[in-house]
Amino acid sequence: MNASSLTRQAVWIVLGASAILTFLCTTVGCQPVEIGRTKPWWEEIEFENEGNQFGAQEATSNDESSSIDDAEGQTENADGTITLLAPLPEYLVNHLHAALIDQDYDLIMKQLVAFEAVELYKMQGRDPNEITQWLAANRRDVVQMLLRMNRGFNSTGVVWEKSGDTYRMKLTGRTAQGMRFTILDLTRENGDFKMVLIK
């Protein structure tokens, strides 16, 4: 048996395998599988108990999940107050995560929630403070979603969509597995990203 004969046999084997796979996929109905970036097991955040304390990895200020330097994401005003900056969505995710860890709902309402969201609540005859009440009640799940979003900005696990002036960040595939919330809607106000909705 010479080399050309072996090559022809290899080609026929590959073609035969392709034909079998095509036949099986058309008769059985194959579904595409999305493969996302996975995290090592030690990066998964587990909550140690209810209340104010999150897992130790999450509570540290030098958390690996934080990709934004605090000095870059804020500015100090003449009166000593701090204004949070969110020129990129990553900044908003980081600020929202930190404020939820600190349970600083006043800061969230004043600087991170979009005017559009507040107006929507008012138009429905609802108190805009329900936004922070909802965040407090769902804090654990929202923090886990934000951590996965922050780690997945450069992966296929976070999908970006744009509709008008609203941007949507969505966890997909394996990144979304086990998550209660997977969507963060954002908008831009005066050059900074603000939170519109979490679902």
Image (cartoon, helix red, strand yellow):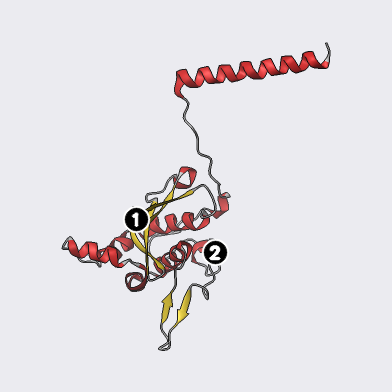
**Label drawn at residue 164:** 1
Amino acid at circle 1: Gly
Amino acid at circle 2: Ser
Q: Position of residue 176 (x, y in %)?
A: 44, 46
Q: Position of residue 187 (x, y in %)?
A: 36, 62
Compared with 171, 83 (above or below) is below
Alpha-carbon neighbours of circle 1 within 10 Å: few (<14), some, or many (≥20)? few
**Label drawn at residue 67:** 2
Compared with 78, 185 (above or below) is above
Q: Are marks 2 and 1 in contact (CB under 8 Å)?
A: no
Nearer the camera: disc 2 or disc 1 = 1
Is disc 1 placed on a helix, strand or loop?
A: loop
The residue that appears at 63% across and 18% down in the rendered structure is: 15
Considering depth in this image, is 5 or 85 the residue closer to the camera? Answer: 5
Left or right: 11, with 113 as reference point: right
**Label drawn at residue 49:** none
The residue that appears at 46% across and 17% down in the rendered structure is: 27
Q: Disc 2 to disc 1, how far (Cα)?
A: 28 Å
Q: Position of residue 6 (x, y in %)?
A: 77, 15
Alpha-carbon neighbours of circle 2 within 10 Å: few (<14), some, or many (≥20)? few
What is the number of callouts on the image? 2
For the view shown, which residue lies furthest in the bottom direction? Answer: 79
The residue that appears at 42% across and 46% down in the rendered structure is: 178
